[in-house]
Image: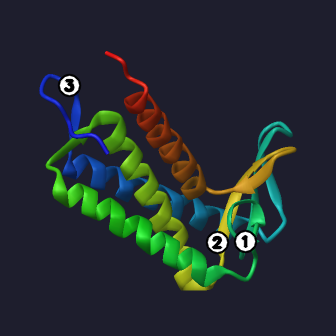
Amino acid sequence: MTVAQPGRRSWPRAAVLGTAVAVFAADRLVQAWVTAHLVVGASKEIVGRVLSLTLYENRGAAFSLFPGAEWLFVGVAVLVLAGGLAIVARRARLPSWTGAATGLVMGGAAGNLWDRLVSGRVVDYIHVQGFAVFNLADSAIVVGMAILLWEAWHRDHDVG
């Protein structure tokens, strides 16, 4: 994890935590709407047949991998949240992209952790035809991790 440098844009702790809370809240709100208006397996088209809301209950990891390992995923989510909080607690500011990514990953982990603790499964609802059914929390985790990996790769390969 890089430290924010003078003259470069950076995010304060509150922005990182605010991003995490916003992701968590958005996931909960969309999930509440979907579960109130659809039954499991039912879909509502958003963009033709390409993108729809489809209610799906997932007891595994992303793409329903490793069903039955719910407590493993609870442990991973707790470690991710603890790690994110430790990073935020140690630094008053983070580089912009690192701060945004940390907030995305923490918010996504919190959303899926909430689902697993409350109901023993994750509710998925974003259906990309021919791909998968996932949720906003999953998307935030994937985007956040991609940003963190991109930043790490550029930091390790920066010659300037």
Label 1: which secondary element: strand
Q: Which residue is drawn at 40% across and 32% down?
A: 156
Q: What residue type is labelled 2?
A: Val
Nearer the N terminus, badge 3 or badge 1? 3
Label 3: which secondary element: loop
Picture coordinates of residue 101 (x, y %)?
Answer: 41, 44
Q: Nearest to the eye among marks 3 and 1: give it.
A: 3
Label 2: which secondary element: strand
Q: Which residue is drawn at 34% across and 60% down?
A: 84
Q: Which of 73 and 152 is in front in this view?
A: 152
Q: Nearer the viewer, residue 16 or 8?
A: 8
Nearer the N terminus, badge 3 or badge 2? 3
- Identify the residue under disc 1: 58
Q: Distance between the residues labelled 1 and 2?
A: 5 Å
Query: Does residue 127 appear left or right of residue 5 in this picture?
Result: right
Query: Does residue 124 appear left or right of residue 50 in this picture?
Result: left
Picture coordinates of residue 41 (x, y %)?
Answer: 84, 66
Nearer the N terminus, badge 1 or badge 2? 1
Q: Are marks 1 and 2 in contact (CB under 8 Å)?
A: yes
Query: Does residue 113 appear left or right of residue 35 in this picture?
Result: left
Q: Nearest to the eye among marks 3 and 2: give it.
A: 3
Q: How crowded is mark 2: few (under 14 residues within 10 Å), some or many (20 or more)?
A: many
Residue 122 numbered mark, or none: 2
Query: Does residue 142 appear left or right of residue 3 in this picture?
Result: right
Q: Distance between the residues labelled 3 and 2?
A: 38 Å
Residue 8 numbered mark, or none: 3
Quarter of the image where the C terminus is located = top left
Q: Which amino acid does label 3 sit on?
A: Arg
Q: Residue at x 38, y 66 (%)?
A: 81
